[in-house]
Structure formats: C-alpha cells, structure tokens
Amino acid sequence: MRSRSLGNTGLEVSELGLGTWGLSGDSCGSVPEAEQDKVIDRARALGITLFDTADSYAHGKMEERLGRRLPADSQTCIVTKIGTDRDADPPQKRFSVSYLRAAFEKSRDRIGRDTLDVVLLHNPSVAAIEKGDATGLLEELRKSGAVRAWGVSVGDPDTGRAAAKSGAQVLELAYNVLHSHDLRDLTELVTEKQIGILARSVLSYGLLCGHWPPHKTFPGIDHRAQRWTADELRRRVSQLDAVRALVGGPVLTMRAGALRYVLANDLVGSAVLGPRNIIQLDQLVREGGREPPYLDDEKLAKLATRLTDVGVEQ
Ligand SMILES: NC(=O)c1ccc[n+]([C@@H]2O[C@H](COP(=O)([O-])OP(=O)(O)OC[C@H]3O[C@@H](n4cnc5c(N)ncnc54)[C@H](OP(=O)(O)O)[C@@H]3O)[C@@H](O)[C@H]2O)c1
C-alpha cells in the first residue's frame, strides 16, 4: 500500500483509507458487529493506515470500536468529525465553542488517545466557518497538542473556500468520476495552501460499480432511497456508459476505473473507501492498482470527451 503526505500536516497516510459510515449501520442498514471488526482488522492487514469516522456514526460507537481495534501506539491515523448533535430530536448541526469542546472531549475518551490525529468540522455552513470561533477552537486544540491537524468536511466549493481561508489543513469532500468539479474548483487554493484532501464517495455511493439497473430501488433506511428521484437515478445509470471508457488492460472493472480515477489525482491524500464487508474491501484494494500510472492519459482523454457528451460537468 503506497502512502501519501496529507497536505502539510506532517502526516503520512495510506492512499486508500477505510471509511466507517457504511459499517456503522447509519447509511444503508446494519452490519453485524463481528463483520465490522473483521473489516477494520483486514484493512490494517492490507496496509491501510487512515480510518475515517465521526462522533455521530452509530452514536459514537464507531469511534469506540476504532479506538479498541487500533491501539494508540500503532501507525494509524484516525480522522473524526464533530458538530452533529444526535441527542437532539431531530438531530442538529451545532458549532458553538461550548458544544464542540464537549464533543471533542467525548471523542477523545471514546477513541482513547490523548492526542487525536485529525478532527474535522462535520458539514458546517459557510456562515458557521466564517464566524471563526469553531475554527479558532480547533486551531487552539492543535496548538495545545490535543490534535495533530484539523479541517472541515465540506459539501460544496464555497464551504471549501471558506474553510481553506480560515486555516483548515485538511478538507474532506466528495470526489469521483461523475463529481469532480468541487475539487477542480478548489485546486488552486488547495495547492497554494498545501491542504490535505480526503476524497470520499469515490464510487458515488455504489453507482460507479456499474451493477445497478436503471430502476434500482433502495429500502427506506438506506440513504440512497432519498438521494435521487427515480428519473435522476435513471439518468445517472445511463451516464455510466461514458465511464466504461476506463475499462480495459489492467483496469478490469468499472469499479476499478472509478477508484483509479481518484488515485490518479495527486491532490488526493487518501481515497476514503466505503466497503460494507470484507469482500468489497478486498476487491477495492486488489483492483485499485499498486502504483502510478493508475490510468493512462489516452483513457483519461477519452473519458473527458465521453463525460461531456453525456452531460457530466467537467
Ligand atoms: N460528510 C461526510 O463527512 C461524509 C459523507 C459521506 C461519506 N463520508 C465518509 O466516506 C466514506 C465512504 O463514503 P461513501 O459511503 O459515500 O462511499 P462510496 O464508496 O462511494 O459508497 C459506498 C457504497 O459502495 C458500495 N461498495 C463499496 N465497495 C464495493 C464493492 N467492492 N463492490 C460493489 N459495491 C461496493 C456499497 O454499496 P452496498 O451497500 O449497496 O453494497 C457501499 O455502501 C464513509 O464511510 C465515510 O467515512 C463522509
């Protein structure tokens, strides 16, 4: 497993990371606890050193699980996120200093490390960032040695820009072959400020495996049931024809092409995977490619043309 620098944080992380939202049961339904442990252990055995979580995943249980399975003396980097109050009904975003300080202490207890590797604000608004007190708290925690690096998980480029300008060292954002414009918009700023990028949703929630029929449905507890209308999903499945341009030679599947597309971007510090079992994890690690070039230039050029043809923003 290759490692990459996470921006200018001084952290070296595996270029494939393990995300734990899917494992937590919060995104697509429950995963047996024994399988959650096996996936985490298998990830370590495969050389994965970056683990992505949040205090809200399974109401903190995923932080506890990672803390138990990844000893503090191991060479692992746990990224966690704070700012979602799931005790409120309905759950609320909260970025006041008093709330975040208490949330940070709870995360530190659950993970069981004196110093947390990376702490991110979990999807704040631009206004919450520009207010300055939430980012100021994270910077204070970094200066005191309670966290190694801090950043923001963002849902759009405007929030990414606000975070970069407020001193975030790490940005986590959706980045995949059908959704590449956010990172492209931020490229100059990210390069100039040497911000570490954690790319999430690299398979577009599973769509980019190319296995779904146009009329795919999801059970109500699955976040994908609310994510797309039936028409929208049909349109996206039809756009996958363009992504097939990546398959061929060492790129055996569309899934492999999608993952390699993310790894081919040097701005990415780690591609945060979302497997829900060991089989999926093994497939992704096996197919992702071991070293550059992940995709050849000819394939990338062909892909760009085809994506434009099917109406994907470039
Ligand atoms: N706001 C945030 O900070 C935020 C938001 C989203 C995600 N994240 C982080 O990023 C991680 C990954 O995000 P994501 O869940 O959106 O990732 P993703 O990789 O785009 O999608 C995950 C889905 O892909 C499918 N999948 C995974 N491996 C597969 C394989 N080998 N073959 C076929 N299907 C496969 C699974 O679908 P099935 O369940 O249908 O099998 C899984 O639910 C999360 O776990 C979390 O840590 C953070």
Image: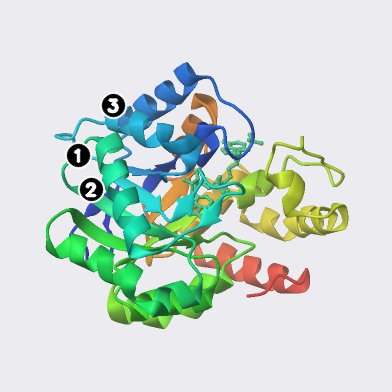
- Neighbours of disc 1 within 10 Å: few (<14), some (14-19), many (20+): some
Please state which of residues 161 and 58 is positioned toward the viewer in this rendering.
Answer: 58
Q: Amino acid at mark 2?
A: Leu
> How far apart are labels 1 and 3 at the CA level?
10 Å
Q: Is residue 134 left or right of residue 36?
A: left
Q: Residue at x 14, y 34 (%)?
A: 73
Let me know if residue 302 appears in the view.
Answer: yes
* Pointers 1 and 3 in contact (C-beta within 8 Å): no
Quickly name the residue at label 3. 68
Number of numbered discs overlaid on the protein picture:
3
Please state which of residues 128 and 78 is positioned toward the viewer in this rendering.
Answer: 128
Q: Residue furthest top?
A: 34
Quickly name the residue at label 2. 116
Work out whether 227 lies above or below 17.
below
Query: Which type of secondary structure does the marked residue at label 1 adopt?
Result: loop
Q: Is residue 124 left or right of residue 77?
A: right
Q: Is residue 311 left or right of residue 133?
A: right
Q: Amino acid at mark 1?
A: Arg
Query: Which type of secondary structure does the marked residue at label 2 adopt?
Result: strand
Q: Amino acid at mark 3?
A: Arg
Of the numbered discs 1 and 3, the one sitting upstream in the chain is: 3
* Pointers 2 and 3 in contact (C-beta within 8 Å): no
Coordinates of residue 204 in the picture (x, y in percent): 62, 52
Q: Residue at x 31, y 31 (%)?
A: 44
Coordinates of residue 307 in the picture (x, y in percent): 70, 68
Of the numbered discs 2 and 3, the one sitting upstream in the chain is: 3
Coordinates of residue 308 in the picture (x, y in percent): 71, 74
Quickly name the residue at label 1. 113
